[in-house]
Structure formats: structure tokens, C-alpha cells
Image: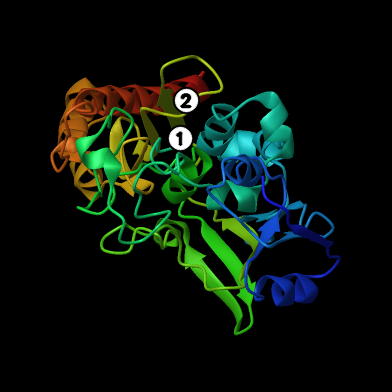
Amino acid sequence: MLPFEYAKVQNEKDAMERVRASGAVFVAGGTTLIDLMKLNVLLPATLVDINGLPLDEIEDLPDGSVRVGAMVRNSDLAHHSSVMKRFPVLSQALLAGASVQLRNMATTGGNLMQRTRCYYFRDTAYACNKRQPGSGCSAIEGFNRIHAVLGGSEHCIATHPSDMAVALVALDATVHVKGEGGERNIAAGDFHLLPGDTPHLETALHVGELITYVTIPASKFAARSAYVKLRDRASYEFALASAAVALELQDNKILSARLVLGGVATKPWRSSEAEEVLTGATADEKTFQAAAEAAMKPAKPYRYNGFKIELAKRAIVRALASAIQLQAEDRR
């Protein structure tokens, strides 16, 4: 790890001013950033420690929404009573991520900002357009078992690693940010960018902007939600395929639906095709299978990751069945 400067701040204004300086980055839990610094993938000149900012509360708002501060730890969010009861998909997604120790350190804002686990991004001996724009993508012709089958481009097929972000998109959450130009609200589904020709640009944040909190709205579908994560081992592992679903039901009919995939795409991947199949249909195995087929129809496999298509379909069907099970349990 190369030498760097360290600055601890106590207010948002100071934090944003320092990060607008060349080579400075925010650090909160540091669960991704420090790893990448050790690998010489990221070489910040200054770490701006924002742990002192008063952004660590979870609040129930009068309109029924929940506001989550950017500094709320993943473990606290996962076990919060409102989240567990009203947004089970979010609690399940958080508990499926990392390890207990990492969840105790990782923050809401940091989780949204975490970087890909692509082998080639994390190894400076290989070409990577995320790390060095214009150098090429080693994954396309390399060992691409963990890589994306949705949302890729000729410049990048790295998957987005966050479980939490997948659930937030399914819940129609909003990310609130603050910067030199004032405050902005970004829909969770628009926060992460497709690689296209600029894979080094991963989020909609402007230079120096700070995530302040995330708002999760009240909805008719959030309580009937579930997250399924399929991976190589039971814990401390990133998704090969995951699915976050949320359903509004009337008896056995699906009135509205959200279906978002993780582990198979370059960003949390909301499937409008699957949602169209689900909406207005009967909540049964046939409908779930049809939705899974629709979700993965646009998939483009590479040499080693074709298995992800079938794996994602199974994650979708299992997640939908789990959400329906919540409905059955509530009737008892």
C-alpha cells in the first residue's frame, strides 16, 4: 500500500470540500476501499474519514416511508424492526452479504459505492477498462465464470456485487446526495450506470458529491418481498445469481410486481419483461417459470458463464415462491 494522507471531518461541508481536491476519496467502513488500496488498484492521495457525520439514523417518516442515513451500518439496517417487517427483501439481502464482521462495519452509502469483484479489475497485471480506460477488457476472452450475461458491452462485462442495491431497486428507493450544486435525488434504479463506452463511470454521482441518505417509500408490494442468492458457498461469497422480488397480491392474482436481478448483470438489473408477465397473472408455478424465461431472454453468455442463465431462472422462481409464502403465512 502506498502512502496517503488522512483527514477526519465532522461536517458535510468540510467533507465535500476536501474530496473535491485531486486524489481524495471518502472512507466510512472501508471494507472495499482498503482491500483495493492494498492491491494498488486504487491509489487515493487522501482518505477523508466521514464516520463523524450525523448520518447514522433510521427514521420512520410521517408519509410511511423510511429514511436510512448513509452511515447506517448494514447489520443495524438488516435487523431494524421496520425493515424486517415492512421490507423483508432488504433485510434478507443484507444478511446474505459478506460476514457478520463486515456487516458491522459496512455502511449504506459504502455498500452502494462498492466496486466489482472482477478478477481482472483487481489484478493490475491485466488490462481493465474500469481501472485504466482504453486498456481493454481481459474478461471477455478470459476466465469469465463470474461475469455478466446482461448489460455488458464490448468494453466491460464485470458484475455489480451489491446485494443491498438489488433490493433497493426492487423497493423503488431513492438515493439522496449533496454536492457543490446543492441536493439531488436519484432513483435507485438510475444510480448505477451501464458500462457502455465508459465503464470507468459507475454511478450517477458527480465529483465531490456525498450520499446523505436513502429513502424507501411505503408501497403495496414491499411487504410481500423476498431475496434469493445463489453462490458457490453458503456465506462470505458474492452472488452467481440473485433475485429480489416484491408482489402486490389480491387473493391469488398479482396486481403489481418488481423483479430485480443481481450477480448476472453489470448493474442491479430490473426486468420489465418479467414484471409484464407477472402483472395481472395468477401466482403459480407456471407464471413464475414464464417470468423467469422472459427475464433471461436478453442474456448473452460468454465462454464460461452460460450456466448463469439457468441459475438465475431458478433464483427467480424460488424468490417468487418465497414471496407468496409470506402471503400464505399472513392468512393464518
Q: How is the image coloured?
A: rainbow
Left or right side of 52 for 295: left
Within 10 angstroms of label 2, few (less than 14), some, or many (20 or more) residues? some
Left or right side of 192 for 31: right
- Tell which of 81 and 307 is nearer to you: 307
**Figure quadrant of residue 249:** top left
- Tell which of 297 and 31 is nearer to you: 31
What residue does disc 2 label?
326
Whether residue 178 is visible here, answered yes or no, is: yes
Q: Quadrant of the N terminus?
A: top right
- Going by the numbered disc 2, the residue's amino acid type is Leu
Q: Position of residue 210 (x, y in %)?
A: 64, 67
- For image coordinates 33% across by 30% down, the residue present is 146
- Going by the numbered disc 1, the residue's amino acid type is Arg
Task: Examine the rendered structure and indicate whether residue 26 appears above or below residue 302.
Answer: below
Within 10 angstroms of label 1, few (less than 14), some, or many (20 or more) residues? many
Q: Position of residue 12 (x, y in %)?
A: 76, 71
- For image coordinates 65% across by 35% down, the residue present is 78
Whether residue 281 is visible here, answered yes or no, is: no
Quick one: SS at disc 2? helix
Q: Are marks 1 and 2 in contact (CB under 8 Å)?
A: yes
Q: Position of residue 153 (x, y in %)?
A: 22, 53
- Tell which of 287 and 19 is nearer to you: 19
What residue does disc 1 label?
224
Q: What is the C-alpha distance between the residues marked 1 and 2?
A: 6 Å
Extreme top residue here? 233
Quick one: SS at disc 1? loop
Task: Examine the rendered structure and indicate whether residue 270 appears above or below residue 80.
Answer: below
Left or right side of 145 for 114: right
Q: If you read the primary sequence from the N terminus, does the residue marked by circle 1 or circle 2 appear first?
A: 1
**Figure quadrant of residue 62:** bottom right
